Structure formats: structure tokens, C-alpha cells
Amino acid sequence: MTASMPDLLRATAVHPALYEKSPLAFWDDDHISAQMLANHLDPTHDGASRKHAFMDKSAAWIATALPPDEFPDLLDVGCGPGLYAERLARTGFNVTGVDLSRRSIAHARASAQSAGLEIRYERQDYLELELNGRFDAAVMIYCDYGALSTQDRRTAMAHLHRHLKPGGRLLLDAFSLAHYRSAQENRTWEACPDGGFWSPHEHCVLKECRTYPPNVIMERYAVITEDGTATHNLWNTCFTAVALAEEACRAGFRVCGIFGDVAGSPESDKGDTVALLLEREG
């Protein structure tokens, strides 16, 4: 297969509308989900999960911010292959993990069983969350919140509010405005004659980074194979602490603490992320 730069440019000639969703659920593609799982499990890789050393520090801090004896039942929303869930279970939480990826949930269940950890995993879309019982605490981290559209964020927060007990706590993070300001609009392309992340077969990839006012970043991947072109749109809405808090308060939460990340670092206007510790009201 051969593809020229004009071929690749034509594949993304029309910019998607804000928050336009990808036509394919790539997280459940057999090949791509395997690549994503490998990235999750790589302790030095920051592209699917945070580096494992950071997760160790983060889980320890979460157990101090949300003591398991006060908040025993914890919901991990977007749990992936269970990397945080296992760390949090070891600190004393009764953990329920939710994720949409079949491969991630299968790995998480097998890993917990192998480690002798009693973690409940549910394969669900957290935009349609329906679990038995309510929880003392929940985490939605690795900036999953900002990957959602405005309406989907409202939906996710409504589900989280409903699944928490009154006084239950939620730890939430998102990319900051410093992250948005550092984004550079560009296009790069790569030829993958022996396959790669997006396909096991020969293909070319055009990656485009584009910003949408006032604070949204889109990364778009056009993957061209002999079978045609597949496009994947990845969105990130970036927030100030004030803007993130306003969305949380509209959803029925109050702010208990503002941090620079989910390991408890101080908030900074130069930091890449912002994190809120919230409490369900009502």
C-alpha cells in the first residue's frame, strides 16, 4: 500500500464539529485494545495510564484524603485494567471498577483473582451507569472527565451524584488551561509498513492537533489502510479550578479541596492538571 501526503490531507480536509464523536469504538477493536492494554501495563508509559510510580503515590494520598474506614465503598469510574483499583483495594477500600472496554475488564478480573483481591468489576458505559447500591466515595481520574462533551459531562456527573451516598466524596481531575496553552496546532504523518498501534497491517497515519476556543483540544487520527480510512477524534476540554468547580456545583456537589493533581500536589497556574475533591450534597 502506498499513500501520499495529498491522500492523507484529503482524509481530514473537513474539520470535525466540536465534540464530534468517532464513528468507531476503537477501545473494543481487537488489535487497538491490545495495544492500549500494553500501554496501560507499561510502568514507564504515560499515554494510557499514568506512570506506575505516580499511581503508587496517588493511591497512598487518596487513602489519606478519603480514609477507607470513613469511606469504605469506593467506585472507580473508567477503571481500565484495574491498576488504580488494585492499589486502592490494598489500602483498605472495597472497590467496584467500571469500564467500557471488554479487554480491560477481562484483564482486571483476572489480575484481581491472581492477586487474591476481592474487587467487583462491571463492564458498563458510565454515561448509562446502573449499579446496585450507593457508594461512600468515587474517583474519575486520568482526565476522563474532559474527554466528554458538555452534555455528556452533565450526564456523567448526574450518574455519579446518584450513585454516591449523601456526604459521599468524589475525586475528579481534568487538564488545566496551562495544558491548553501549551497545545500546538500541527499535522504529522507516519508510514507503518509493518503495522503499528492502529492496525496490524501496513498503514499510514495522519495525526492532527487542533484547538477549539475557548479551551478544547482535539487530536484526530486518520488511519489509511488498503480497506479505506478510519478516523478517530480524541477531545480534551481544559479547565481552571473555578470553571471545574462551577460544573461540579451545578451537579449537586460542593468543593472540599483543590489540588494540582490526584496525588495531592498544590494547585499551580503552571500545572498540567487540576483536581477537585468534592462532596455530594443532598
Image (cartoon, rainbow, N blue to C red):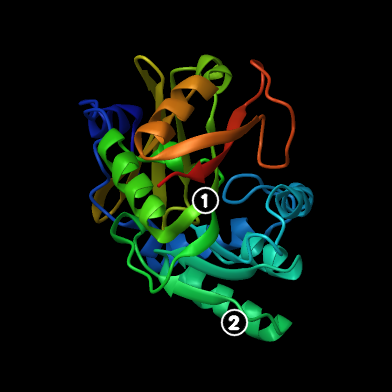
Residue beneath disc 1: 167
Residue 105 image label: none
Q: Nearer the viewer, residue 8 or 90?
A: 90
Viewer-side label of 1, 2 = 1
Give the quadrant of residue 71: bottom right
Label annotation for residue 110: 2
- Disc 2 is placed on an element classified as helix
What residue is shown at x 73% (from left), y 27% (from top)?
A: 266
Say how many tags the image has: 2
Q: Mark 1: which amino acid?
A: Gly
Task: From the viewer's perspective, tell me whether residue 115 is left or right of residue 166.
Answer: right
Dividing the picture into quarters, in which one does residue 46 lie?
top right
Where is residue 189? Give x, y as percent. 44, 33
Is 42 left or right of 109, judged from the image as shown?
right
Residue sitting at x 32%, y 67% = 130
Give the answer, above or below, for where 44 lies relative to 258: below
Give me the residue at 34% from left, 40% from top. 153
Decide if residue 232 is in sight here. Answer: no
Gap in Å between the C-alphas at discs 1 and 2? Answer: 33 Å
Q: Residue furthest front?
A: 282
Expressed as whole percent of the image width and height from the top left, the position of residue 167 reads 52, 51
Q: Where in the figure is residue 281, as x and y percent of width and height? A: 44, 44
Say if residue 261 shows up in the picture: yes
Q: Residues within 10 Å of mark 2 (few under 14, many from 20)?
A: some
The kind of residue tagged 2 is Ala
Q: Is residue 242 above or below residue 173?
A: above
Q: Are marks 1 and 2 in contact (CB under 8 Å)?
A: no
Residue 191 position in % (x across, y down): 46, 42
Is residue 83 left or right of 163 when viewed as pictured? right
Secondary structure under the numbered disc 1 in the rendered image: strand
Can you say whether 269 is above or below 33 in the image?
above
